[in-house]
Amino acid sequence: MSGKSVQEEYAPNSICFGCGPSNKEGLQIKSYRTENGLEMEFECEEKHQAFPGVINGGLIGSLIDCHGNWTAAIAIMDKNGFDAPQCTVTAQYEVKLKRPTPFGSKLMLKSRVLGLQNDRAEVIIELKAEGKTCATGRGLFVAVTEGHPAYHRWH
């Protein structure tokens, strides 16, 4: 994973808590293209723990949500032949916590598109630590149009 992340390339001024490059207090995730979706690595800080040694489930949800959203945005962009992604928002997502996510391990997230239309994508996401699946997610992400409050958030 080298070069610019999709967030840095397409939304450098975004203030999103999970994926906004310009939010210095946020998570600033960086997702990179793969053959079938996106992947990312994340290293948690002590403040991300739910209790000693285990990462907070809400933080896991944020990672899955933002990474899945960007997976959808890139897939919709590619499908429509656009030069930049339309802003997408989360319509629905779920997280399954499979086992405690250990603090001190690099988290690896991989995503892929299950279903794709011109303005929406269904995405699945897997979060691993130490080679073990700790959480999975599935979401529906929709491109918004002019008039939606999020329409200009990446520009």
Image (tube, grey):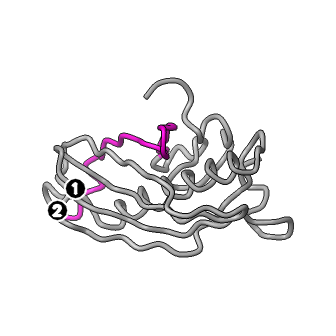
- For residue 101, what is the image quadrant? bottom left
Q: Residue at x 34, y 60 (%)?
A: 60
- For residue 135, what is the image quadrant? bottom left
The magenta span reads 28-51
Disc 1, SS: strand
Provide residue 97's location: percent of width, then percent of height. Answer: 25, 68
* Mark 1 to mark 2 CA distance (whole Å): 10 Å
Q: Which residue lies under the disc numbered 1?
A: 133
> What kind of residue is marked 2?
Pro
Label 1 vs 2, first from the N-terminus: 2
Up the image or down, 142 lies above or below 70; here it is below
Total labels drawn: 2
Provide residue 55's location: percent of width, then percent of height. Answer: 24, 58
Q: Quarter holding the N terminus?
A: top left
Q: Which residue lies under the disc numbered 2?
A: 100
Up the image or down, 42 lies above or below 1; here it is below
Query: Any magenta on residue 49?
Result: yes
Disc 2, SS: loop
Q: Residue at x 58, y 56 (%)?
A: 72
Q: Residue at x 59, y 74 (%)?
A: 91
Up the image or down, 35 lies above or below 73; here it is above
Provide residue 15's location: percent of width, then percent of height. Answer: 62, 51
In this rendering, position of residue 69 left or right of residue 9: left
